[in-house]
Amino acid sequence: MAFLGFWSGAAVAQGPTPAENTIVVTAQRSGAPMWTIDTPTGTIVLVGEIRAVPKSTPWQPDRLEEATAEAQGVIVRAQPKFSPGDVFRLIFRGGRFTRLPEKTVAADYLDEAQRARLAALEEQYDQDYDRGSFLMTAFDLLARRLDFDDDTTDDATEVVRKAADRADVPITRPERFRGEDLLDNLADADPASHIPCLEAAMDATEAGQGIIAQRGEDWRKFDVPAVMGNPLEIALGTCWPWADDALGEEIRAQWVGMIEGAVATEGVTLAVVPLRVLAEPDGVLDQLEARGFTISGPEWRGQP
């Protein structure tokens, strides 16, 4: 029994092999922030992904492709599963997603300061947001007025997914949400629940396009607290589905479960996880650390 206990403890303390180290170093040279967890049988690499990486951001996705091709497994996010029936549901119920409830306008939900800010943006961009749902207004501000997703390159998920497909590396994805459930969740939401999303989108839009490049630069410099504090990242993390209590909790639980499941996998597992899910307070990194995992990588918490 004493011998078995010693062997078990030595196995837990065992570090990565030279081949595993090579994969990890190659991945790290891509320039994306990442964290490693050594396990008794290998290494888990957590890549902190931001969506819409500007082309001006000096990172090297080809290094991430090389590491993926040599990994023993990858974990990437899944897209929602929409059926033809969901498309018809969206067509017939589209007004519930795009507009405020009948006979109500923005001023019925917003305080005077919030409505004044929105009016200023309406004038600036020659738009009428008075009847639009706050979620759709927020998306319009971010995608069309701030134009945050223009002139971007492939995000880390696409880089890893394509490289894994080419190299026949096994891919694990979280269970996909049904389109019907997502649409029902969105249709049933109180319009006021999207006001924080609208406010965050207004903050980002008012801050101007400089925050887009700054977010990419901070991501590349591994300054995770700065990325998390960027108005654009805050807006993307404050809007549905991330901010929805039920969906957000399920998304985070899926990631923690998949990463814990990878502990028994031999070799290197490369997991691409949204940075906001990894580094937020009580996010995936905090939860994994609370479960006793030793995590190596950039500091993800802001100053207390």
Image: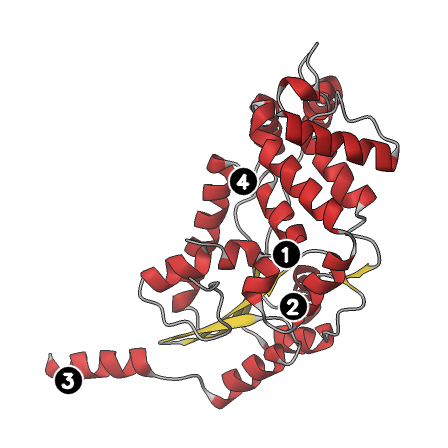
Tag 1 and tag 2, C-beta contact below 8 Å: yes
Q: What is the CA distance from the residue labelled 1 to the residue labelled 3?
A: 52 Å
Q: What residue is disc 1 on?
A: 230
Q: Nearer the viewer, residue 191 or 20?
A: 191
Which of discs 2 and 4 lies nearer the camera? The answer is 2
- Which dot marks residue 218? 2
Circle 2 packing at 10 Å, graded few (<14), some (14-19), many (20+), is some
Q: What residue is disc 3 on?
A: 3
| SS class, disc 1 | loop
Circle 3 packing at 10 Å, graded few (<14), some (14-19), many (20+), is few
Q: What is the CA distance from the residue labelled 2 to the residue labelled 3?
A: 49 Å
| Mark 4 or mark 1: whose residue is earlier in sequence | 1
Tag 1 and tag 3, C-beta contact below 8 Å: no
- Which dot marks residue 255? none
Circle 1 packing at 10 Å, graded few (<14), some (14-19), many (20+), is some
Specify the amino acid type for callout 1.
Asn
Which of discs 1 and 3 lies nearer the camera? The answer is 1
Residue 14 rendering spot, x and y as whole percentages: 34, 84
| Mark 2 or mark 3: whose residue is earlier in sequence | 3
Q: Residue at x 82, y 26 (%)?
A: 128
Q: What is the CA distance from the residue labelled 4 to the residue labelled 1?
A: 17 Å
| Mark 2 or mark 4: whose residue is earlier in sequence | 2
| SS class, disc 2 | helix
Q: Quadrant of the C terminus?
A: bottom left
| Mark 1 or mark 3: whose residue is earlier in sequence | 3
Q: Is residue 292 left or right of residue 272?
A: left
Residue 26 rendering spot, x and y as whole percentages: 62, 82
